[in-house]
Image: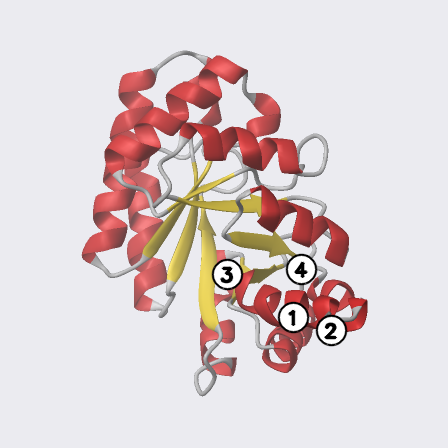
Amino acid sequence: MLSLLTLKNRIVERLNKLIDLTYLKPDTTRLRIEQLCAEAIEYDVYSVCVPPYFVQQVARILEDYQVKVCTVIGFPYGYDSTQVKAEAIKKAVEEMVDEIDVVANIAAIKSGDWAYTMNDADSMVRLGHMRNLKVKWIIEMNLLTSEEIKHVCEIAVSKEVDFVKTGTGTVGNPVSPDDVRLLRSLLPDHMNIKASGGIRTLEQANALIEAGANRLGTSAAKSILIN
């Protein structure tokens, strides 16, 4: 019978490669990004996710490591036009990103403009996949009704996004296992889910993975992985 310590170590071993180590606060500095990259290398997380301004710096630091580079597009509310988001993706590609977290246009969703929302998703996925990027679509569950979440998930499936992401972590309550379970019930098994927002402990992280999350966005990898 495995000891509790052994079980915990096994959980941590699989968690490190499910973490996008993230720092997106508006007062982020280059020094903070250096520290973030050092932490990512130390704990061998899946990726570092930073604002577009810092992508070149991160790509340079992580050039000789397996940790991937991720950035956000249209952060935090997806207000930018589809054309502006497209240009941001092209710029990110030039600066050597591996994955993009694209914010759905929340205003369009709340307005019931499903044609715009679908076209926006289609453009982001096509552009990202043409450039070999994983595309995560942030839907900001804390701002949406159950019916809106269902409709957004239908669009995500039809446009073949790689991940549906629960939120930006800037609005409302921390992500919960119930949030993930809801998405899992609305998405096919092959579609990935990224949970993000207020994930700070090993217990939280494990509960989200058990609920069906395939990736975690957090700034607290250290506290999770040495818990």
> Circle 2 sits on which residue?
6
In this view, the mark in front (2 or 4): 2
Residue at 25% over, 61% down: 132
Tag of residue 53 = 3
User: Within the image, what quadrant is residue 202 found in?
Assistant: bottom right
Dot 3, crowdedness within 10 Å: few (<14), some or many (≥20)? few
| Gap in angstroms between the C-alphas marked 2 and 1 | 6 Å
Q: Are marks 3 and 1 in contact (CB under 8 Å)?
A: no
Dot 1 alpha-carbon crowd within 10 angstroms: few under 14, some 14 to 19, many 20 or more:
few
Crowdedness near tag 4: few (<14), some (14–19) or many (≥20) residues, C-alpha within 10 Å: few
Front position among marks 3 and 1:
1
Q: Quadrant of the C terminus?
A: bottom right
Amino acid carrying label 1: it is Arg
Mark 3 or 4 closer to N-term? 4
Decide which of tag 3 and tag 1 comes sooner along the chain.
1
Of discs 2 and 3, which sits in the foreground? 2
Secondary structure beneath label 1: helix
> In the image, is 212 to the left or to the right of 199?
left
Q: CA distance from mark 3 to mark 1?
A: 36 Å
Instruction: From the image, tell me which residue sits under label 4.
Output: 28
Considering depth in this image, is 183 or 92 the residue closer to the camera?
Answer: 183
- Residue position for label 1: 10
The amino acid type, in three-letter code, at marker 4 is Thr
